[in-house]
Image (tube, rainbow, N blue to C red):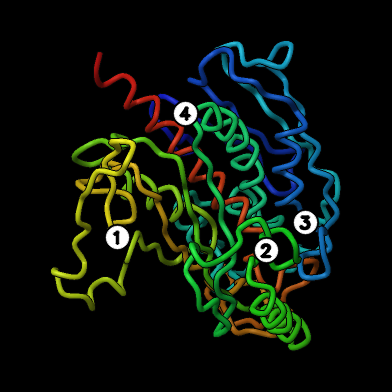
Amino acid sequence: MANSFGTIFRITTFGESHGVGIGVILDGCPAGVPLEASAIQAALDRRRPGQSALTTPRQEADRVQVQSGVFEGLTTGTPISLFIANADQRSDDYAHIAGAYRPSHADYTYDAKYGRRDHRGGGRSSARETAARVAAGAVAAALLAHFGIEVKAYVSAVGEVEVGKSYEELDLSLIDSNPVRCPDPEAAARMEARIRAAQAAHDTVGGVVTGVATGLPPGLGEPVFDKLPAVLGHALLSINAVKGFEFGSGFEGTKLPGSRHNDEFYTDETGRVRTRTNHSGGSQGGISNGQDVYFRVAFKPVATLLQPQQTINQAGEAVTLAGRGRHDACVLPRAVPIVEAMTQLVLADLLLRARANRL
């Protein structure tokens, strides 16, 4: 049923938005990785609802329970079970859509696929499921840290408001210095104003998250179908509301001639192979070359609007729906740790696969 992801470092998530809780079983993590529940909790705190006036006011503490696979602060090599209880469900907010299809939601497609659906908060299709991914991503981050690999993401656009600088020109330590999670303070202020304008209009707004992975060794990625950009694209496009993914120079790179787009190799003073530019985004032939990996992820505007929209019900009759309850006007600030987590999971898996490829 495609609820699992990864080959060696493999996760299976479970649970629904308005069920007892959500969780993840992680298999394939090597023994001996330092891991404290507080590190997982810190990652979840960045994703949880109700963290600022820009996000949904649903109050979920998202307290993680480490149920297995960790002993005395180290992973044991056995399956790691992480569980997060739901505490602030208001299922009655969704009673009016039990038999109707919200525009641009998964209501109709879940009915078409399964013949039934959990309408409470979207059930399994809810972005609440991503908390389990963030928890698993924190485990992956602990493994990557052992090898000096770090992943960071930040909001680089909200609607028409964009950061006009590359990640190399920004101080990424400022990502969490504002509620938008944008390391450009001037752009962050304009983004916050754009989100507040959407809230005031009972509307929503989309945007872009930029991700960067540093410290990667050369050799990560599997030809032919599990190339690094391909697996990363698979992972990031599986996140709710994601509508686009571009790697390295992406679509802008198509405007350059090959003579300018090619990344020329050289050997630095330490003997390490480097490239003078990095239009390739740290990957050639789908395999990491040791340079930074960078990419952009496009998120659509949130589908739930607190204003009337035309749709149909299960009988095919025209009806008018307006969203109720507590919803984000913009998912971008809370999407940052989700993008980081999925990237961490991909890199942890590819790292373990690469170590199995040669003596």
Q: CA distance from mark 1 to mark 3?
A: 39 Å
Q: Amino acid at mark 3?
A: Pro
Which circle's residue, 1 or 3, is located before the other in the chain? 3
In the picture shown, does residue 326 fall above or below 188? above
> Between 273 and 305, which is closer to the camera in this rendering?
273
In the picture shown, does residue 217 fall above or below 325? above
Q: Amino acid at mark 4?
A: Arg
| Mark 2: secondary structure | loop
The residue identified by callout 4 is 10
Q: Is 36 on the left or on the right of 58, as rendered?
A: left
At a point 61% along the width and 58% down the height, the residue shown is: 172
Circle 3 or circle 2, nearest the eye: 2
Q: Which mark is residue 277?
A: 1
Callouts 3 and 2 close, C-beta under 8 Å: no
Image spot of residue 321 (x, y percent): 68, 79
Q: Which mark is residue 181?
A: 2
Residue 25, quarter of picture: top right
Which circle's residue, 3 or 4, is located before the other in the chain? 4
The residue identified by callout 3 is 49
Image spot of residue 201 (x, y percent): 74, 88
Residue 40, quarter of picture: top right
Callouts 4 and 1 close, C-beta under 8 Å: no
Q: Amino acid at mark 2?
A: Arg
Which circle's residue, 2 or 4, is located before the other in the chain? 4
In the picture shown, does residue 185 fall above or below 284? below
Determine crowd level at label 4: few under 14, some 14-19, many 20+ residues with C-alpha closer than 10 A: some
Which circle's residue, 4 or 1, is located before the other in the chain? 4
| Mark 1: secondary structure | loop
Q: CA distance from mark 4 to mark 1?
A: 34 Å
